[in-house]
Amino acid sequence: MKQNIIAVTGLLASTTSAYAAGLDRSGQDIGVLFETGNHLEFSAATISPVVDGRSRDGFGPFSGISISDVADTFQLYSFGLKYELNDQLSFAVVVDQPYGSDVIYPGDPATSLLGGTGATVDSFGITALARYKFNENFSVYGGVKYQEISANVTLGGQAFGGLNGYEGDFDSDGGFGYVLGAAYEIPDIALRVALTYQSKVKHNLRTTETINGVPVSLIPGSGLSETSNTSVDTPENISLSFQSGVAKDTLVFGNIRYSNYDQTVVRPAAFTALSGGNALTDLENAFDIELGIGRRFNEKWSGSLAVGLTTKGDDDFVSPLDPRNGSQYFSLGVKYDVNERVAVSGGIRYTELGDAIASPGGNPVADFKNNSAVSFGLSIGIKL
């Protein structure tokens, strides 16, 4: 007999997947595609990180200095719309902010190891999807995604030597990729297993490079151009998600996602030449893993609990532009059904950021330990 199972897909979406692998912020969730009937949803979240460190010994007057408030609070917004054409064919559109960074080190670049170092990455994404159900058990889906990305990076402090004062400004550029997937379902027990692949997206960013405000083209004998094009690929990823009823009004769910950052390498022409062939980025491939349980308490209220982690890199050495190595978190979510058409979901997520050693050019200069982030989210779902 069909069980009365809570459908918690997306219940924790409002608590955001910020601080997942690499620059990932939204998780590029396509859960709206599996909602029943025609569905519209809006989500917003605010993320408040606390990222502090301390310079290592052996750097003279810069040794043992506290480094505070490296990461700024930021907000995320998303939108999803699903429309059923008939019992077999449905469509969805998802708008989100897939990637981002908001890092700035306090201090004077002339009198500190990393003061003035910072990175800002902004993005916009829209994904159009179609799903075809062969029967109540098997379906396939796919579509096209469009992404825009822009960035600004500054390197400040004595740890960067002659590159102290470097700035790279990367103009916005858009590119296309694709999504492919398949799902198996048993509706009577709210079982669903879905495998989704999202391709990389190629970008060609118009780049302006300066050092202490002076165009690199004016450096004597450099032969460098002030502007150039920097080719960047956002990572491809593959995810396996599942949910299943385990008792009346109780559901377990989970997801494992692998992001391939091997080709996400930022090498602006002047920086690469001046640094001896180095890249601005130091991003490693990683898994994001989540497991949770949802429970319907009555006709109006539902709740969920989830735990998860992002795997660490091969060592603790990281770029100062992203001073953490892996993470682990827990989330609490609640959903209130206002009526048969409208539901409001909210949640909170606490993330422990993995300890890391900021190492510009492979030279360890600062330790970052015991850092964390708190996320608050809200989502409104409407049956059309």
Image (spheres, rainbow, N blue to C red):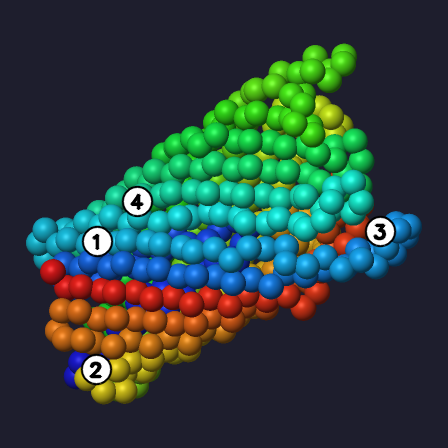
Question: Helix or strand or loop: what does disc 1 sit on?
Answer: strand
Q: Amino acid at mark 3?
A: Phe
Between disc 3 and disc 4, the foreground one is 3
Q: Residue at x 54, y 49 (%)?
A: 102
Task: Determine the CA span between mark 3 and mark 4.
Answer: 47 Å
Residue at numbered disc 3: 62
Between disc 4 and disc 2, the foreground one is 2
Q: Which mark is residue 127?
A: 4
Task: Determine the CA span between mark 2 and mark 1.
Answer: 23 Å
Q: Residue at x 34, y 71 (%)?
A: 346
Between disc 2 and disc 3, the foreground one is 3
Picture coordinates of residue 299, whole percent (x, y): 19, 84
Residue at numbered disc 2: 300
Question: Helix or strand or loop: what does disc 4 sit on?
Answer: strand
Question: Helix or strand or loop: what does disc 2 sit on?
Answer: loop
Asked if the residue at tag 1 contacts the one at tag 3, i.e. Cβ–Cβ closer than 8 Å, the answer is no
Q: Amino acid at mark 1?
A: Leu
Q: Is residue 150 left or right of residue 55?
A: left
Front-lying residue, 326 or 5: 326
Residue at numbered disc 1: 81
Of the two numbered discs 2 and 1 on the same chain, state the one appearing first in sequence.
1
Residue 371 placement: quadrant: bottom right
Asked if the residue at tag 2 contacts the one at tag 4, i.e. Cβ–Cβ closer than 8 Å, the answer is no
Q: Is residue 177 left or right of residue 227?
A: left
Quadrant in which the N terminus is drawn: bottom left
Task: Determine the CA span between mark 3 and mark 1.
Answer: 53 Å
Q: Is residue 127 left or right of residue 98?
A: left
Q: Would you say residue 65 is visible in this rendering?
A: yes
